[in-house]
Amino acid sequence: MDAQQVFEKLLQPEASDNPYPLYAAAHQLGDVLPAGGGLLPGSGQLVLVPAYEVANAVLRDPGYLVPDASYHDQFSPGWRDHPALDASNLLMLNGDDHTRIRTLVTRHFTRRRVAELEPAVERLTDGLLDAMADQGADGTAVDFMQQFAFALPVTVICELIGVPPGLRGEFRPLARALTLTLEPLLDEEGLAAADVAAVKLTDMFAELVAERRAAPADDLLSALVQTADAEPGRITDDELIQNLLLLLIAGFETTTNLLGNGVMLVLDDAEANAGLKSGLGSGELDAAALVEEVLRYDSPVQFAGDRRPTSPKVVGGVSVTPDDHLLVMIGAANRDPERFAEPDRFWPQRPDGGPLSFGGGAHYCVGQALARLEGAVAFPRLFARFPELARAGSPERRVGIILRGFEHLPVTLG
């Protein structure tokens, strides 16, 4: 296969089950792979970046931009008519606008603030495990994705932001519809569903902003509203709402996938991972190390957003221009044999960690420390409570090449 064929095969639904042979084929072709034009908006070529070192360099280089409003004005006429394509969140901003909003948001995601959340994450985890135990007490299969992998991170991020419990049940289908806009080829039906979801979520948060403005509480939403009011010009209400939506969706969607992918890996190979459940449950195995290996081996995010250089560059021996699209293949970079020994081995005590799953540079994931904390708390508690946890039936993967996780993962508790 050539690079264009690799990319076209990745877009097929069956690739969602196992894209890794295609990543291996990409590594055989080289570090940076021109894949032809016409596959994405604009006149330039698509360039795939599967190599770890090059991918890391591109993500950290301020000379590469994400597609922002000015880009979409040029190449995607009519995009402003779609609420789901709002370009005022951090994923769609460059330069001063990105810095202005990111510094405001990261003020509330310091390492100390995240560490202070650990007791709350432990409490929420134990409560969800109690509920799972009740549901599966008679041997009935439990959907791990719905009952735990979604419920834990959505509750954590909603409590942090200040979203009342009555609204949380609506978030998963709405967020799932909105994440369709991350996929490189979005059809009209998917865009229409994303638009409906965007309007509903925006209206919800507009009401919450108005409530916190009238009656502040001890939460992130109130803090951001107070900053917006105290520093005119720092952030508009639309920017505030869109970035709260981003925090909400990113705060549970990727962590949901991390938890589901991790449990599947532990359960899927009884011989190779025989000691994992007992090691995690007893505390003998470092849960943080397991989280890092899950992130590497089966990353919740498989591709970084489209990047384009601000001026002509040579990257990995390939000439690229501002018209070109660089797609950083995070899932492939995390399996790069030039970077990781035995890259296709799931190895929780791996000595050469360092996955790119949360990106890098200016767009490094704001909530990465919180996702890591939730995984490190959840995995040991889960396997200590249910040492005989086992698969029950066939899991169902979500379809797409950007976000990788399960829709359903039935398990029995033993």
Image (cartoon, rainbow, N blue to C red):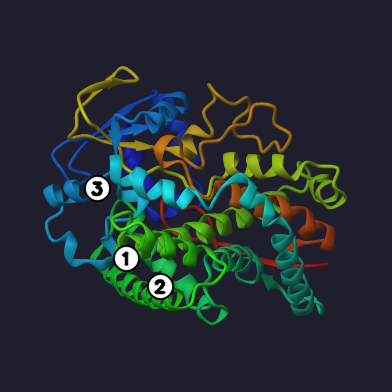
Image coordinates for residue 373, horizontal then vertical, percent: 66, 50
Q: Amino acid at mark 1?
A: Asp
Q: Report crowding for label 2: few under 14, some 14 to 19, many 20 or more residues within 10 A (C-alpha).
A: many
The amino acid on which the numbered mark 2 sits, given as a three-letter code, is Val
Question: Which element carries disc 1, helix, strand or loop?
Answer: helix
Name the quadrant of the C terminus. Answer: bottom right
- The residue at which mark 1 appears reads as 237
Q: Are marks 1 and 2 in contact (CB under 8 Å)?
A: yes
Give percent across and percent down for residue 316: 35, 20
Residue named by callout 3: 68
Which residue is more in the foreground, 8 or 251? 251
Locate residue 152 relative to residue 166 in the image: left or right.
right
Residue that numbered label 2 is attached to: 209
Q: Residues at badges 3 and 2 in contact (C-beta under 8 Å)?
A: no
The answer to whether residue 387 is visible is: no
Q: Nearer the viewer, mark 3 or mark 2?
A: 2
Q: Residue at x 66, y 45 (%)?
A: 291
Mark toward the viewer: 1 or 3:
1
- The answer for how far apart the CA atoms under marks 3 and 2 are is 25 Å
